[in-house]
Structure formats: structure tokens, C-alpha cells
Image (tube, rainbow, N blue to C red):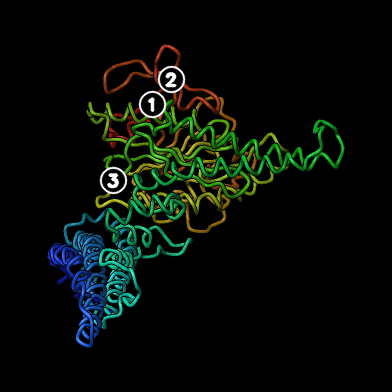
Amino acid sequence: MVSWGDLRRWNPAVLSDMAAALNGKYLQLLACSEDFEDAAMPSGWSGTAATAAAGASKRLIEEGKEWAAEIAAIRRASGDVADAATGVLAGFKEAEGLAKAHNFSIGDDGAITDHGLPPDVPEEQREDVERERKAVASELGERVKQTLLSAEDVDNDFCAVLDPAINGHTIDASGEGTSLAAAGNAGEALGSLSIPAPPAVDAGPAANAAWWDSLSKQQQERLIKDHPGLVGNRDGVAAWARSKANIALLADERQKLLDERTELMRHAPADLSRDVPSVHKYQEQLAKLDERLAALGKVEGIMLGPDGKPLPNRQLMSLDVTGDKVKAAVANGDVDTAKHVAVFTPGMNSAVETNLDGYVNDMQSVRESANRMVGDLSGKSVATVTWLGYEPPATDKLGDYVDVISGGAAQDGAEKLARFDQGINMSRPDDPHLTALGHSYGSLTTGIALQSDTGVDDAVFFGSPGISDQPYGDGIGGRSIDRLHVPEGHAYTLEADGDPVADVGNITHGRFGEDPGSMEGMKQLSTHGATSLLDGRPLSASSGHSEYTLTTPDGTVSTSKYNMAAIVAGRPDLTISK
């Protein structure tokens, strides 16, 4: 078994040097190939001695084939192991760095030691830091586990190549007509290493991040190319990789739906317009397929340019075709490198096929404003994500009002959103300033998600019916805001005049906790007309439920959008209070 202490002594450079040396020997051996064949039976020689010489030459040729196979296999494996070991050590260093940054250490046996809360932590921050350190301890455990699993996989694969070579059984060298080069090619194939298998589908972001970080760049690229479905929706994997994998899946998923539609139409009645039960099932299936095709078409339009190539500054962080509707998450900017990252969760009547593009454009506008607030002319400091990784209710259907009241979709979505937020933090070597933005039903989903340790630093709720899965006055866990795992003073709310959803708590008797607009500890931000504290520009008022991210036709940004951007940029000093 490979131990954590063993990894401290791993040196991939030795294997790289060995692969280079073996390559020289392999080429020398191939150069002898014709000499072997010519020595097998000199022309015109016969008799007992000739027969004995021919047998010896045959054995020499067979040994040469085995040598060629052995050298080629070990050469290939040495190079692959050096590459894989580099990835494992990257995961090792990631875990060691995380431990040191939070006052933990990892022993040679992989045991994690907590050296206590750093003494310089201010008293008012100790509770938040303690909670963060518990999450870090859990993440460290997963990182150690997955890194060692990857190391063991590499070690076992190398042994599987070395053992037959040591015993002289890399290939069956007795076959006639097999050249040294062909034997070497066979050995080369046998020297290829497998890629460590990913954690289970339901694994947490920490396990996924640890597995991904323990792979070399070459292994990562191979996985994206050969198995994009294992990468694209795995929270904890780097955003660049998820996007590349999901874009690769787009065409395949679209073709599957087109093939399914063709098959359906092959069996469907000629006249699909008839209002009879026998036709209804085909109408419903066709409508569902067309809806899903429209959703994938919308994603393609957002992610790809006219030339079919991925657009710069966009990342497709999830593409989920399971369930009733296609789900997706689209980023503006680079989530892997941006100092400030915001995740926006839309609410009721939101769907990929209808309004995802509008949300992405709104979040691009928030991103641009936030970049100006941090003084970044390059536009790289901020990234925004539109997360539609759940299925919010559509209230044009009577039955869906039941779900609005029950909050079932919000609870299901919150679990996924919490993992998504955690994954952003865990996929990076540094800790970005992470802001959660939630609108309408999406603010409820966001609020429930923030009852877990997501790593979110700021939260902005707008047009919110409530942010809790517990009714107001239930006495469970104190006030709704106390359940949010965000630093004290870092929760904000926006409520526009004439927004009926923001007052839905009065109708549902606090089904989703207190009205965010009246919560003690919740900072109230303005949605009225105002003047920018950044540059003195006028800001417009928002009204109703759908103008929080408004930019007027003349280019005037709403006060509510400006306030969101200020929080995303980490500039609360620029916000305008209610």
C-alpha cells in the first residue's frame, strides 16, 4: 500500500530519465533486427551444425522479440507513470497547502491533526472560522483518501507491467513472422496505464476535486475526450474542464433526441392534429422532445459562435438532460481564476429553452459593472454564473401552485446548489470571494442551500417570498437569518415597489420563514432611483417582480442591479441602502 509518507519521496523525474534511456536502448535493438534475420541461416550452409545454428538463432530472435516488447512496455509505462505521478503529487501538494493554510497537518500515515484555531482570529469571527475549519477538515479527509487511491492505482498499474517483464512473459514471442518492431508495438500497447476511476456518481465535491487534482493534465484531457460524461457535471472539477466536456456532449445529446424524434414519428399516426386519445400520447411525447431540442439549441446559441466554436469568456459548467427538463449552468468569465464569483439562481417560470439567454445577458451586465467597481480594465476579476440546475415551478399550471407552497422544488434544488457552490471553492487552489444571488423562488432555493456550509461569503436575495424551509414562528433554530451560513452582516435583500411575490409571506403565513425585508440582521438595499457612488451616474428605479436586473433602453442601470454588482465586487461601501 502507498502511504502519505511514500508520496513525500516520490520523484517523477527519475522515471522520465529512465524512459529516455530505455528509448535509446530500444532504438539500438531495432537496428539489429535485420542482422538477426540474416544470421538465422547463412546461404548454402547445411548439415548438423547448420541445424543447431538455426535453432540457436531462432531462440535468439525470440529473445530479441521479448526484449523489444519488454523495453517498449517499460519505456511506455515509465513515461506514463512519470506523468501520472506528477498529477498525484499535484493533488498531494494541494492537500498539504490546504492543511497548512488552516493550521492542520497530515502525518505520514495520512492522519490529519488539528492544531487548533489560529490565535490571531478576531473574537467576532471565531464562530465563522470554526465552521469553515470543520468543512476544511472534511475536505482534507477526502483529499487524502482520493490522492492515495490514485497513487495506489498508478503503483498497481506499473507493477502489472513490470512483473511480466521481470519474468520474461510480456508477449508470446514464439510466433513466426513477427518482427522486432511488431513485438515492440505489442509491448508498447501493454505498457499503457489506466486512468484512476472517478468517485461514485453521488460523491461530494471534495472527493471529486481530490480525484481531479490527482490526475495529470494529459489524463484530464484524455478523460474529457473519451468520457466527457464523467466530467461535465461533477461538482469540484475545474470549470474549464467541465465546460469543455459539456460542450463536447451537446452535439451527442442533440443527435440522440433527433434520433428519438425520428423513431417516434415513424410510428406516429399520419395526422397528429386529431383530438383523440390515441393521438394524444404522440402529441405529448413530440412536444416534450421538441422542448428538449429547443433547450439544447438555446444552450448552443449561448455557448457557440456562428463558426460553431466555443465563445470566449463563456463556460458551460453543467448540462443535465435527466428529469423533465434540460438543466444547465452558464458562466460569464473564468470561474477558475476570477477573484470574485457570483452564482445567480432564477425563480418561477425559468427554463433553459425560454429565458436562460436573457439571464446570462443580465449576469454579464452585472459582471461588467462589478469589474468597473474593482477597477479592472481587463474584465477578468469577476465571473458570474447563471445556475438553472433545478426545475423551478411554472405557475401557469394550476397544479404547480401546490409546489410553490410546499417548496419541494426549492428543497431539491438547494441540495444541488449547495454542492455546486462548494465545488467552485474546492476546485480552486485559492478561495474566491463567492456571492449567492437569488431571485423569487430562486431566493428560497438559495436560502435553503445556505443552511449548509457552501463557502458563500455574501448573499443577495431579491423579490423573495422567504429564504427558509421552516415556517416563521416554528421555534426551530432561531431566526431564519441565523440559519444562513454566511458571515454576519453579509446578507442583503432588495424589494421593489409593487412586487407581490416579495409579500407572499403574508399570504402563506410565513411558510418560508420571516419576510426577508423585515429580518433583523438582513441589510436592506435600495431599488429606488439614485446616484452611483462610484461615478455619479444616475440610477433608475425598479418596480414589480421582474425589473431587478433592469437596464433601461438609454443604458441607465437600475439601482438594484448596481447594488448587486457592488456586493459581487466586494465593495459594500458603494451600496445604496433603502
Task: Indicate the quadrant containing the C terminus: top left, top right, bottom left or bottom right.
Answer: top left
Residue 437 x %, y % = 43, 39
What residue does disc 1 label? 365
Q: Residues within 10 Å of mark 1 (few under 14, many from 20)?
A: many
What residue does disc 3 label? 432
- Rendered position, 62 above or below 262: below
Q: Secondary structure at mark 1?
A: helix
Q: Earlier in the sequence, mark 2 or mark 1?
A: 1
**Looking at the image, which residue is at 26% across and 83% down?**
167
Q: Nearer the viewer, mark 2 or mark 1?
A: 1
Q: Residues within 10 Å of mark 2 (few under 14, many from 20)?
A: some
- Rendered position, 40 above or below 578: below
Q: Report which quarter residue 369 is drawn in.
A: top left
Query: Does 152 sit left or right of 320 as displayed?
Result: left
Instruction: Residue type at mark 3: give it.
Output: Pro
Q: Report which quarter residue 339 is drawn in.
A: top left
Q: Confirm or deny contact between disc 2 and disc 1 (CB under 8 A).
A: yes
Q: Secondary structure at mark 2?
A: loop
Residue 70 x %, y % = 24, 73
What residue does disc 2 label? 551
Q: Nearer the viewer, residue 141 or 150?
A: 150
Query: Does 570 sit left or right of 24 as displayed?
Result: right
Q: Earlier in the sequence, mark 3 or mark 1?
A: 1
Instruction: Residue type at mark 1: give it.
Output: Ser
Task: Indicate the quadrant containing the N terminus: top left, top right, bottom left or bottom right.
Answer: bottom left
Residue 428 x %, y % = 29, 51
Query: Does 154 sit left or right of 408 as displayed?
Result: left
**Looking at the image, which residue is at 27% across and 72% down?**
158
Q: Nearer the viewer, residue 255 or 319?
A: 255
